[in-house]
Amino acid sequence: MLLVAAAAYVTMWLVSPHRGRRGAIRVTLGERASADEVAVALYRAGALDRPWLFSWALTMTGVSERIPRRTLLLRDDVSPRTLLRAIASGGALLRVTIPEGYTRFEVAQRLAREGVISSEDAFVTATEDRALLARLSIHADSCEGYLFPDTYDLYPESTSDEIIERMVRNFRRRWEDAKRRAAITDPRLARLALDDQSLIVLASMIEEEAGTPEDRPAISSVFVNRLTRPDFVPRLIQSDPTVVYGCRVARPPSCADAPRTGRIPITRAMLEDSANPFNTYRHEGLPRNAVSNPGRASLEAALRPATTDALYFVAMGNGRSAFANTLAEHNANVQRYLRGRGR
């Protein structure tokens, strides 16, 4: 009975997730690390309790004979069994989720926080590498827009190029699938004759402006109407997120000290700054590059805008937007929804 109880205890311990800080840890092993030394190192890193039991498990499963002689990238919130498998496979796979609408700067920040990369700046620099962009057939100044938001199991110590290439391959699959389903017939899009790069830029703007999936096609319609309606001139899209993105990458005078991540409050000076190449209040048409990495719903909305006459929209404060066909209607919506919130 004691043996049965002990076996049950060990089994339960092996499969129970450890109560860590839900973050990545980095453990460097010596040239001839023993099972005991590995267990103690993981214990000190906060990845497990009962290091003596984990040392025994390493030995009994034979994993102690395959301990990598290098740095391990692991998580501190997984079960001992998962740790055993990770060590046996060479150091772990880290599961990282990239949310829709993240910029490449936020992607780099998330990857660094999860322990996948050691340098945010190196990743950002890689997203702008001309040779890599050419290899990936990206006709833009960066990979912005092509780092598809998804959940990835990433190999430890992968290079920035490897991660970017994987995310872009994922994007290509999703994008081609979206185009097949859309079968573009909208006469406005046909008139604009937008190439893939321009459609991806449009999708990134939709991603940034939409508070709910339901509003994405209507927001797409507003942008397309502004670009195609003969009575709407100059063709200024007037999207705040484009201004913010320009503050992050171009550093125009109105926002020279803007951070690469985090909130940037919009000012009148920013809206009037023509030195910002992403300022759609001052420059007609779409920006050259995407302003975030859009998800599937925004890609589909760019390909299939709603059929509306709307030229304006304003956030209502509940995640939805109020749309208007005329400036007078829009001003009334602004008075109702925006002024009341103190902006």
Image (cartoon, grey):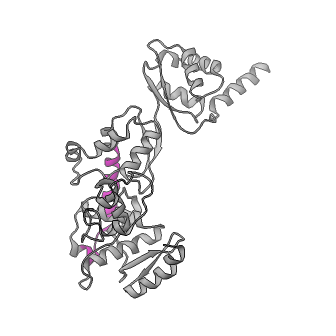
Between 236 and 230, the one lying in front of the other is: 236
Instruction: Please state the horizontal and vertical placement of residue 340, each as a whole percent of the image.
Output: 54, 77
Between 182 and 217, the one lying in front of the other is: 217
Quarter-of-image position of residue 272? bottom left
Identify the image quadrant of the N terminus.
Answer: top right
Q: Residue at x 19, y 47 (%)?
A: 134
Q: Residue furthest right?
A: 1
Question: Up-down: is 36 above or below 199?
Answer: above
State left or right for residue 277 relative to residue 155. left
The residues colored magenta run: 166-189
Instruction: Please state the horizontal and vertical placement of residue 175, each as a whole percent of the image.
Output: 32, 57
Q: Residue at x 61, y 21 (%)?
A: 54
Question: Up-down: is 342 above or below 21?
Answer: below
Q: Residue at x 41, y 69 (%)?
A: 216
Q: Residue 222 lies in magenta, yes or no?
A: no
Between 245 and 308, the one lying in front of the other is: 245
Q: Residue at x 38, y 58 (%)?
A: 294
Q: Residue 178 lies in magenta, yes or no?
A: yes
Instruction: Please state the horizontal and vertical placement of residue 291, each as a whole percent of the image.
Output: 33, 59
